[in-house]
Image: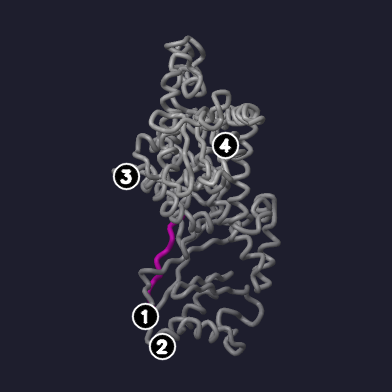
């Protein structure tokens, strides 16, 4: 409150002469946030005038100015070019420390130097991201918890730099995203050839609900641009208009951070559907037929899996498991043939195609069916029939021609539910649905 009173004090008409010499000197500016103040003037003498007045007022208010925490930074014109110099300014007869030539100073978290570069911000960002990701990596945590720490803690630590520094999205992608992606691949055991597009999707799209730092950067810039545009201060609006150039127009198209995130997800969904035909086969197939509530259930179940199975499920979704076909693509194996049947060993072949493992596929099918039968057996008012040992056979009702995996009949014979189970590879979902419907159409 005292500082604000002082600002109003020096802005009063009768004190306009301090720092000015009757309309002949350059205008001066005072920037202040809480107890941090910055005085910018066109001449060194003007600055000293204002500092003297400020010193007198602080003495009257019994406030102490910490000269050791102050600094001066000067730029002047020499012939035709500007150069940095060391101004001599005093407060209470004490010389204010100078910013050395070529060095920078920090005000409200923003670095300023003679070239108005962002080298300090870039150095601090790269150092910070390395430290934070290394610290998380060293913790004996489940991969899902490491992702959670990254999403909720690390990204928040980058927000201020992303807001105040003049950076480019390309620089953030090349220098910050690359570090983050390296650790995410390590935690989830995803090889360099495996896409992270699946991981960047939301939970209800079989992703891990995280996003790269470059997206956080776009969100911060979007918020900044919106604040400038909607500010009640006309001078701030003019600042938005004057900076509405090619660099910033990419952020002005967004109305909110949610819109930025929605666009990001849409890009990766399109990438999985239309470009990554192999690694996006799971997403393309399942997203057509899966129910939204079941997608959420999948996310909850996956988060409770042990580390090795959790990582296995993620690599299964983006088809980056070490099948012979993938190993051949990566240059690790000399051939892509299955050891047992000599067919190309793709993920589809391993899960549902190898003729040497038909008994194993049947065991998997019956294991899932047994779980369903055990669960539905407790439904009151219904009779259960299952094509499994220990249960009444569905052929009692349907005959041997049509023998579905499971029947659930109402006790009064008014309703009959037919369940036909298929446990295969996700890319076969559509063909399996058509085949089962055609088989039982007459029934």
3D distance between C-alphas at marks 2 and 3 = 54 Å
Q: Earlier in the sequence, mark 1 or mark 4?
A: 1
3D distance between C-alphas at marks 1 and 2 = 9 Å
Residue 30: x, y in percent?
54, 74
Can residue 318 be found in the magenta stretch?
no
Residue 136: x, y in percent?
34, 46
Q: Earlier in the sequence, mark 3 or mark 4?
A: 3
Outermost residue to the top: 342
- Within the image, what quadrant is residue 69 found in? bottom left
Disc sitting over residue 189 in the figure: none
3D distance between C-alphas at marks 1 and 4 = 67 Å
The residue carrying mark 3 is: 141
Foreground pick, 197 / 416: 416
- Within the image, what quadrant is residue 8 found in? bottom right
Foreground pick, 319 / 84: 319
3D distance between C-alphas at marks 1 and 3 = 48 Å
The residue carrying mark 2 is: 61
**For the point 67% across and 56% down, which residue is it?**
252
The residue carrying mark 4 is: 286
Query: Is disc 1 surrounded by few (<14), some (14 to 19) or many (20+) residues within 10 Å?
Result: few
Front position among marks 1 and 3: 3
Do tag 1 and tag 2 residues touch (Cβ < 8 Å)? no
Q: Is residue 60 left or right of residue 228?
A: left
Disc sitting over residue 64 in the figure: 1
Is residue 176 in view from this perspective?
Answer: no
Q: Secondary structure at mark 3?
A: loop
Foreground pick, 318 / 350: 350
Do tag 1 and tag 3 residues touch (Cβ < 8 Å)? no
Q: Secondary structure at mark 4?
A: helix
Residue 84: x, y in percent?
51, 57
Q: Earlier in the sequence, mark 1 or mark 3?
A: 1
User: Mostly what secondary structure, the magenta segment?
Assistant: loop
């Amino acid at each position: 409150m005292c500082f604000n009173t002082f600002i109003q004090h020096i802005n009063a008409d009768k004190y306009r002469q301090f720092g000015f010499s009757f309309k002949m000197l350059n205008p001066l500016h005072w920037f202040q946030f809480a107890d941090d103040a910055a005085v910018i003037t066109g001449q060194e003498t003007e600055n000293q005038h204002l500092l003297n007045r400020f010193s007198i007022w602080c003495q009257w208010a019994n406030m102490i100015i910490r000269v050791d925490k102050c600094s001066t930074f000067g730029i002047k014109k020499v012939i035709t070019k500007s150069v940095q110099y060391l101004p001599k300014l005093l407060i209470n007869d004490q010389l204010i420390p100078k910013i050395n030539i070529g060095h920078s100073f920090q005000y409200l978290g923003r670095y300023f130097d003679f070239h108005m570069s962002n080298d300090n911000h870039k150095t601090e960002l790269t150092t910070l991201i390395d430290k934070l990701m290394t610290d998380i990596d060293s913790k004996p945590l489940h991969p899902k918890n490491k992702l959670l720490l990254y999403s909720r803690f690390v990204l928040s630590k980058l927000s201020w730099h992303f807001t105040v520094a003049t950076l480019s999205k390309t620089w953030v992608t090349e220098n910050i995203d690359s570090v983050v992606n390296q650790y995410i691949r390590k935690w989830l055991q995803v090889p360099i050839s495996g896409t992270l597009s699946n991981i960047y999707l939301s939970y209800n799209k079989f992703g891990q609900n995280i996003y790269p730092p470059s997206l956080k950067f776009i969100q911060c810039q979007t918020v900044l641009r919106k604040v400038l545009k909607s500010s009640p201060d006309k001078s701030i609006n003019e600042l938005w208009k004057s900076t509405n150039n090619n660099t910033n127009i990419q952020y002005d198209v967004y109305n909110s951070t949610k819109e930025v995130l929605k666009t990001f997800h849409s890009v990766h969904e399109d990438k999985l559907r239309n470009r990554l035909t192999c690694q996006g086969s799971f997403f393309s197939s399942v997203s057509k037929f899966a129910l939204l509530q079941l997608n959420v259930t999948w996310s909850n179940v996956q988060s409770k899996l042990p580390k090795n199975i959790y990582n296995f499920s993620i690599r299964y979704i983006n088809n980056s498991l070490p099948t012979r076909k993938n190993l051949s693509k990566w240059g690790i194996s000399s051939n892509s043939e299955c050891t047992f049947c000599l067919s190309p060993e793709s993920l589809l072949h391993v899960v549902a195609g190898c003729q040497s493992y038909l008994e194993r596929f049947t065991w998997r099918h019956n294991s899932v069916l047994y779980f369903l039968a055990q669960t539905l057996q407790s439904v009151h008012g219904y009779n259960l029939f299952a094509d499994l040992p220990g249960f009444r056979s569905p052929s009692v009702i349907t005959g041997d021609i049509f023998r579905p995996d499971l029947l659930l009949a109402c006790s009064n014979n008014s309703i009959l539910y037919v369940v036909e189970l298929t446990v295969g590879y996700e890319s076969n979902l559509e063909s399996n649905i058509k085949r089962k419907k055609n088989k039982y159409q007459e029934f």
